Amino acid sequence: MHEFKFPNRDSLKIKDIKKIKTPALVIFKNSVIKNINTIKSYLEQVSPNSGYKHLCPHVKTNKSSYMTKLMLGAGINLFKCTPNEVEMLVEAGAKEIFVAYPLLEQNAIELAEHINANSEINFQVQIGSVEHAEILNKVSINKDVIWNYFIDTDVGMHRTGTAANNVFEVYKKISEWKNFNFIGLHGYDGHNHHKNKILRESTSRESMAILLDLYNQFFNNDIQINKIMVAGSPSFRTDFEILYKALKNNVDILVSPGTWIYWDSQYDNILPGEFEFAAFVLAQVMDSAENQITLNLGHKRWAADQGEIQIFSEPELKIKSFSEEHTVLSTDKSSQYKIGDYVLIVPRHICPTVNLYENFTLIGKEGEIERLSIPIDARNR
């Protein structure tokens, strides 16, 4: 039995660790289940006894039919994805799928084929401009599909979505076309990852005010908005509270975080302890020298887009350098490490880290290897 200790966290155990070929992505099932329960409790603090009614988790974090089925079993019914994860969600048994990505023509054709082949699934898309709608209209004519759509609104991230002052005009144009069914508004505030709570909440109020103003514009024109979907992991609690208090009797409010199911050090730095770390990279010492050790792990197996790894099972370890296949760590205890020793690592950015692995190892409640290899079905699609 190997035991790994992290500051201010319960220790983690892995039995029969030699069965795991490193570097490996290891998932602690008990922590995943705790996170699923925790997000429910956060939502029910605002909307009592609502269960997972208001949750639409983005599966780009886990990309896994196993995790999707785990969430389905818990009572989560609606899932958010990019086009790359649609097939995985269909195969996992999801009954409601929102593709939150502007669809170019080939993506739209493939999704239309899924719609025609799976009439029992409620598919939804986002439209951020009339040009997006024109692509979908062309495909709808050729494939004979109805598009259930959200209008994607830029609430401050300035990445996709139409400006607030253009949303109603986009709606009016699309409403003239027969193959479109308007659902509501989508506004992702991915720019809201401030560590300062006051600034984070202020940014939420600014973003949600855009959507509330739009709701009133539609309402004053006798147009029903059925759903409003918002938020990533850092902002979902504040966004949800703002919208729910304002619109709970009029609109279904949905939040769509993804990272929460596994968590990572980047978001834990913003919201310490909000969720449990559930996904780790397991590596081994492959070489050592005075005041340093080298792991059999480089950034081909941990995402470096948000910076270097910060949290190791041995807290004195610090990154000295890294490359594609190696990570060199500085330590004044290098004499204590032997070739083959194990190090457990918290990813800095879990979503792209998951995408670097073909499968993961599932660790059970008592540290047992419950499944040695579970496919990450939707990676690289």
Image: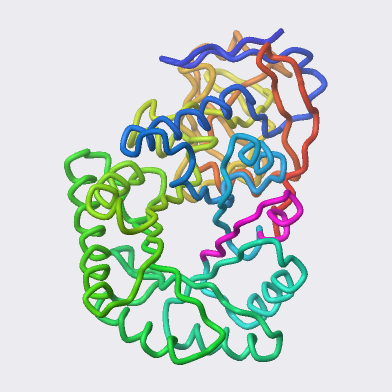
Along the viewing direction, whichever of 376 and 164 lies nearer the viewer: 164
Residue drawn at (56%, 52%) of the image: 78
Figure check: 277 above or below 52: above
Instruction: Confirm whether the magenta stretch covers residue 299.
Output: no
Could you say where residue 333 lies in the image, as x and y percent from the top left?
52, 11
Residue furthest to the right in view is 19
Provide residue 110's location: percent of width, then percent of height: 71, 74
Q: Is residue 240 left or right of residue 198?
A: right
Q: How many marks?
A: 0
Q: Nearer the viewer, residue 108 or 17?
A: 108
Query: In the rendering, at what x and y percent does residue 106 appear?
Result: 67, 80
Residue 365 in the figure: left or right of residue 255: right
Q: Quadrant of residue 117?
A: bottom right
Residue 44 percent coordinates (x, y): 38, 34
Residue at x 58%, y 52% (from the top left corner)? 60
Q: Is residue 147 above or below residue 243?
A: below
Residue 89 highlighted magenta (yes or no): yes
Q: What residue do we see at 63% from left, 65% from top? A: 83
Q: Residue at x 72, y 57 (%)?
A: 90
The quadrant of the picture occupied by the C terminus is: bottom right
Q: Residues in magenta?
A: 86-100
Does 35 sit above or below residue 358? above
Q: In the displayed structure, does residue 284 sit left or right of residue 77?
A: right
